[in-house]
Amino acid sequence: MSGHVAGIFRHPVKGFTPESLTHVDLAPGEGFPHDRTYAVENGPSGFDPDAPAWVTKQKFTVLAAIPKVAAVRTRLDDASGVMTAEAPGHPTFGGRLAEPQGREAFVAWLTAILEPGDIRGPLKVVDARGQFRFTDHPLGQVSIINLASVRDLSAKMGVELDPLRFRGNLYVEGWPAWAENGWEGRALMAGWARATVFKPIVRCAATDVDPTTAQRDLEVTKALFDNYGHMNCGIYVRMTAPGRVGLGDAVTEPQEQAAP
């Protein structure tokens, strides 16, 4: 049985707005293109762009710690490299985060939006290089969300959860609810690309924040544990063969263990 791709998203700045795409080209040993390639330090994090290594999300301005981040709407223009950002009651920002002056301008803009109590130290934009990405798990290359699982959780909670709470790259329709939790190590195809399932994604307080209102309004992680005995929603996969993935493309349900 196969599902199909119902949504493709990237998050150029860790913790900020998901951007919808019509397709993406994925390849082994590469991060999801323009996804979590920047992060904003909330005080010194120890991250070194010249020797990038995983740093806990709590060192950055992310939803788990600062729900108001969800009120910021960002969009990256691939051709120009210009990122625009909007927030209610504030002027629109536009600048290139690849350039020092663009980073400094974005930090100044963001500082004016966040509450003083949310800022632990100087804000600073840092960038990922090569295949490194600011993912929540150091080996999580591409994240996939099973929409049936989100609907099942919604039914248990008696609310309609916005799937974007789970900040995935690919959203799949057509898989049985929660089947993905048993697929670790198995192979699948997404569009023309091949991948191996790495592990389920353990959720944090970021999912408690409504991505539209920027309010911490639900206890999603508690509901996961109370109803299922785990806090997983979605899977990380690692690409094994390159290919393009587009909206509507098939995503196979893995049946056999991937070859070692």
Image: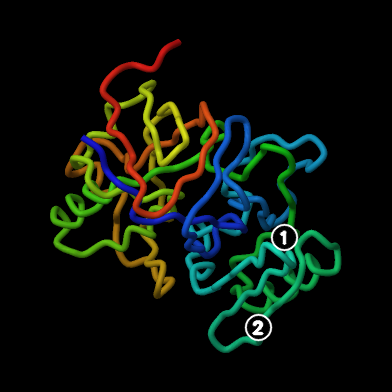
Residue linked to disc 1: 121
Residue linked to disc 2: 92
**Residue visible at 84% across and 62% down?**
99
Which element is circle 2 on? Answer: loop
Residue 213 in the image: x percent, y percent?
40, 75
Residue 41 higher or lower than 137, as above or below:
below
In this view, the residue farthest toward the top is 260
Taking the image as shown, residue 197 lies to the left or right of residue 82, namely left
Q: Nearer the viewer, residue 111 or 85?
A: 85
Whole-angstrom CA distance, mark 2 to mark 1, is: 24 Å
Which element is circle 1 on? Answer: loop
Badge 1: residue crowd in 10 Å (few <14, some 14–19, many ≥20): few
Question: Residue 197 appears in which quarter of the rendering?
Answer: top left
Q: Amino acid at mark 2?
A: Thr
Question: Residue 74 appears in which quarter of the rendering?
Answer: bottom right
Which corner quadrant holds the N terminus? top left
Which corner quadrant holds the C terminus? top left
Q: Nearer the viewer, residue 10 or 199?
A: 10
Residue 151 in the image: x percent, y percent?
20, 54
Q: Amino acid at mark 1?
A: Gly
**Residue visible at 61% across and 48% down?**
33
In this view, the residue farthest toward the right is 100
